[in-house]
Image (cartoon, rainbow, N blue to C red):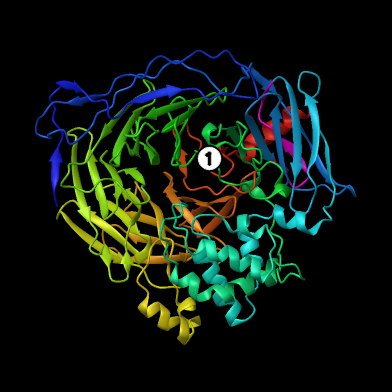
Amino acid sequence: MRSSAASSARARRACPASSITSSAPRSTRSSPISKPCPPAPRVERPGRNAMQNHYLRVVALAAVCLVSSGVTAPAADHLLSGTVASAAGEKLGGVTVSAKAHGSTITTSVYTDEQGGYYFPPLPAGTYTVWAQALAFELAKGEVDLTAARRADLTLKAMTDVERQVRQLPGEMLMAALPEDSAADARIKRVFRNACTGCHTPSYVLQFRFDEDGWSKIIDLMKVVPNTGVLPANPKPNAIIDFHQKELAAYLARARGPGESSLKITPRPRPSGEAARVVWTLYDVPMVPEAGIGTTYQTNDGTDWSLGTASKLGLITHDGGMDFDGNLWFTSNNPNRQVTVGRVDGKTGAVKFLKVNRNDGLAANAHGLVRDQQGMFWFDVNPGRRSLGRLDPKAEKIDVYMTPPNMSPLGGAVTVDVDGKGKVWASAPDGAVRFDPETERFTDFKSLSYKTARGTGMTYGAAGDRDGNGWWTQMAFDTVGKGDMASGKTIEVKLPAVQAELDRITPEARALYDKFEDLSFNSPFPWQQGPRRMGTDKNADVLWVGNSWGGSLTRIDTKTLETTIVPLPDPVAMQPYHLVVDKNHNVWGNLWTNDQILKYDPSSSRWTVFELPVRGTEIRHIALDERHGTTQVILPVYRTNQMGVMRLRSEADLAALKAQAAR
């Protein structure tokens, strides 16, 4: 274990290699007054000292430049309610109802109760587009001026076009619909799920239809594209996909080919109870202009489910959180020239970009994000060597700290967390690093296995527990590492295999797997759990891990290392990505292929699943805000390029709105 301390000396010298600027994206939806941004603040580097310039501090006072929203919100004192019924007059419960003021970038969504009634929280005055939709129904839309009306009743008509019904489906329903009646189908279904959906939801690929030759051509490409999405000069085929290519192409052609489909679609219940009482607020975020898409916002923003799952071109929202003023912050992981982190004003929807310059002038990309107890955000940032960033949301000031040269940089699929003692933990390619904000000292812990004959165990998730220890996952190796601060050593927890998948392996496939040398978090064996991102209970000695391939959660006692696998309600179709734990020990996670998030109460083993109001979301991060006695769930809605907040409402909250609406 090595550590190094950043100097407390305050001497600075100019360093042109990195800088931060702030800018406001242009909007085609509104025309607010926009002021040019002042020149980028200078970047300063500490003089030679104990750290010997091993960290770079980037200081920026963000410019006052606006915005991409455009609607100034007046007093929010207008209620909107109504009912949703079928064409036959049946009142429909659990229907998604959304409202968006003309010219606004903010959409509010609620769900109908068992009597088909819906009740929005107070909304600003204005003219709204209101729409309702449910699976197997056409979208119903209306207009309402809240200064003159308070009610909008909507009628849903059955959707008769089967292909449009398929395009409505979230990823997990399409995955569940793939045939698995025979042992061969069940086996190849798991290969498809593990090897072909590591970077995108199954709904993106399964919304299309191809014959066997067409599917084979797609597999020709996908087996050589790495998880970066960038085709290398001399691509090496993924041996698992290559081995199963013919079987995969035939299987997909039976399900999504030109002939009769083998899909078996099972309807899922619409939201009810607690899941139907929530309120969603989605904020549109502009896409990267240089992507050349010709539009400021995502044209397929998930609003009309029948349009299917959108392309990822130009997207920027990866991880997110809420500051103490109710504004939302997000990281941008895709290459661009404008944004490293961004802010969405929680009241107006105005968007501001902050940029840390990369050494080639592009924006340094970022991935993980977490808020600490003082309201500061910590994130990884890559100005040339992947580093740790600290954002003061009030001052819009960013500091960047580099690990020393004798220590690994941040890396892998970086996740950032703050432990119970206020120390910051982040993923490194070969383990995890810990940063002490008071001493500016890094400490690193190495994975016990990293580069092996079987492949590379790159770090995925990272977390800190309440005692100040660190944890990280090696998704490719089904391993969870613990950085034990008391001993300074790494302790390894190995997760069990998914036995049902081991039992299905054919002798021919076993021979391939025994010789396989390219394990990664995009090339797994069918029986792997795939521990991805995770969260600790800061009020207990428990770590929860989302197993993306196993369709399960892992509970680890942080002191005894006792490990328990908790299967999800549908282990094949549901893929957890990131987990966080609230103050009542409930586990929250995003089901990234499902357009859903989940809550698990360990005391009662009760699952609650909450639906998003849009389709094709592919969420990769989840955060909570519990400061005001209510739970707010913050989500960067990745594919539709939005920031989302889900607020829980009690039965009493809803009853009060119903009483007001009845006056």
Q: Residue 100's spot in the image, x, y percent? A: 69, 30
Magenta residue span: 111-124
Residue 176: x %, y % from top left = 63, 66
Q: Say what amino acid the circle numbered 1 marks.
A: Leu
In this view, the residue in front, 489 or 629, is 489
Q: Which type of secondary structure does the marked residue at label 1 adopt?
A: loop
Query: Image point 72% across, 26% down: which residue?
Result: 79
The residue lying at 52 percent from left, 61 percent from top is: 222
Q: Nearer the viewer, residue 575 or 239?
A: 239
On the picture, is 415 further left or further right than 247? left
- Residue highlighted by disc 1: 315
User: Farthest right residue?
Assistant: 88
Report which quarter residue 490 is drawn in. bottom left
Residue shown at 58% from the left, 32% from the top: 283
Depth order, front residue of 278/571: 571
Q: Would residue 453 appear left or right of 187 to someone viewing this image?
A: left
Residue 208 locus on image (x, y percent): 68, 58
| x and y, in percent, of residue 7 in the image | 13, 30
Q: Is residue 570 visible?
A: no
Taking 598 as reference, is 20 above or below it?
Answer: above
**Residue 455 against residue 389 in the figure, above or below:** below
Q: Quick one: quadrant of the C terminus? A: top right
Residue 541 in view here:
yes
Spot the residue most to the bottom: 507
Q: Verify whether residue 157 appears in magenta.
A: no
- Going by the image, does 39 lie left or right of 247? left
